[in-house]
Image: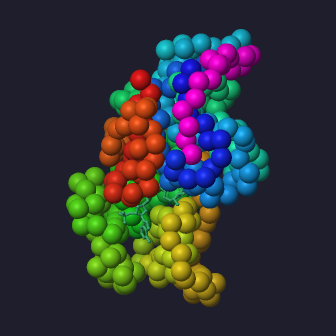
Amino acid sequence: MRAYEVPAPTGLDSWIPVERDDPKPGRGQVLVKMRVVALNYRDILVATGRYRFPAAFPKNLVPVSDGAGEVVEVGAEVTRVRCGDRVAGLFAQTWLGGAQAADSRDGTLGGAIDGVLAEYRVFDQGGLVTVPDHLSFEEGATLPCAAVTAWNALFGLKSLQPGQTVLALGTGGVSIFATQFARAAGARVIVISSNDAKLDKARSIGATDLVNYTTHPDWDAEVRGLTGGRGVDQVIEIGGTGTLPRSIKSVAPGGVISLIGMLSGGSTIDPMAILGAGCVVRGVFVGSRELFETMNRAVAFHRIHPVIDRVFDFDAAKEALAYLDKGSHVGKVVIRMA
Ligand SMILES: NC(=O)c1ccc[n+]([C@@H]2O[C@H](COP(=O)([O-])OP(=O)(O)OC[C@H]3O[C@@H](n4cnc5c(N)ncnc54)[C@H](OP(=O)(O)O)[C@@H]3O)[C@@H](O)[C@H]2O)c1
């Protein structure tokens, strides 16, 4: 089969096309013909050697965590899926439910273990969920990391309520899913972005209030103003140290800041600011199968369609990664395997 490997994580060029033997499913395992994979910012971090979990990558790792495909063969004792089912893999293969499993980082696709940028992949049957019927393979492929992370942020600790307000930073994969889920839950969504055209797109997806953080570097004041001084109930915090001080200034007492990404730097965090805000700052690490399945029920009920910015062919996989790195996308970038 055709696949890509990362012999050494030296840069965006480190994905190398290879031929591998076709895998066979063993007892309790499932062979999936991958149809589409979706990229995350993490794939850039892995390719460039900047991803921290795990600290050292397995040799010749198959990259990319997210993908959807079709079950083409099942091993003995497989009961959860059948041939022909449309499935997606869990980001953290062994985290099935409850609080974050202590060993969940040891089984993450395209990081600690081989990912899905290959024509076929064998999964343990427990590491799969079925893709909602109304979604294409392109759309289904986008769910495992960005969507589950957004869902976990909004509903995993302190569930978002109708009428509450969410602040989503940027217009990438996680923040656009958060916008869609929050709107479906009856919440108001303030999106901040570097770019007015991206903000227009966010509005068309459901964002209710828009702030350009380039023309308004004091965006926390804008957010306070938009909420009558109260602040927001939840923050989708993908910026890290560079944005967290302003996120803390944007949140209402008792609100939750979900610490998800580290795309910016350059400031220090004052613990007193967190104390003064009376908020919860919570680390989010994607989510469990239980969260994925709950999210899929909501995606199916509300007929939510993931936002796909651009589709690349398998042979242009490296171009897809470079395109994601450029940062001009809104939503998700995907690669078709066929
Ligand atoms: N903890 C987890 O489980 C988890 C899961 C998924 C992702 N992540 C992390 O979350 C981050 C986002 O991931 P993604 O896949 O959504 O990335 P993405 O699709 O590449 O989107 C990144 C977006 O971040 C926005 N951004 C960058 N710097 C910003 C800043 N200073 N202020 C506000 N927005 C800023 C940009 O939006 P504009 O262009 O609109 O300004 C950009 O489009 C990454 O760091 C990723 O590693 C973590």
> What quarter of the picture does the C terminus occupy?
top left
Q: Is residue 270 above or below residue 58?
A: below
At a point 55% along the width and 61% down the height, the residue shown is 260
Residue 301: x %, y % from top left: 38, 37
At a point 55% along the width and 41% down the height, the residue shown is 15
Mark count:
0
Magenta-tinted stretch: 14-30
Residue 174: x %, y % from top left: 45, 54
Residue 336: x %, y % from top left: 41, 31
Image side of residue 36 versus residue 144, left or right: left
Q: Is residue 210 visible?
A: yes
Work out whether residue 128 or residue 183 is closer to the camera in this orientation and state it.
128
Q: Is residue 192 above or below residue 177?
A: below
Q: Does the segment drawn in magenta span residue 102?
A: no
Extreme residue in the right direction: 102
Work out whether residue 180 or residue 114 is closer to the camera in this orientation and state it.
114
> What quarter of the picture does the N terminus occupy?
top right
Q: Is residue 181 visible?
A: no
In the figure, residue 50 lies in which quadrant? bottom right
Q: Does the segment drawn in magenta span residue 27?
A: yes
Q: Which SS does the magenta portion mostly show?
A: loop
Image side of residue 54 versus residue 334, left or right: right
At a point 54% along the width and 18% down the height, the residue shown is 71
Q: Is residue 188 above or below residue 125?
A: below
Work out whether residue 22 or residue 165 is closer to the camera in this orientation and state it.
22
At a point 52% along the width and 21% down the height, the residue shown is 33
Residue 129: x %, y % from top left: 55, 31
Figure colour scheme: rainbow
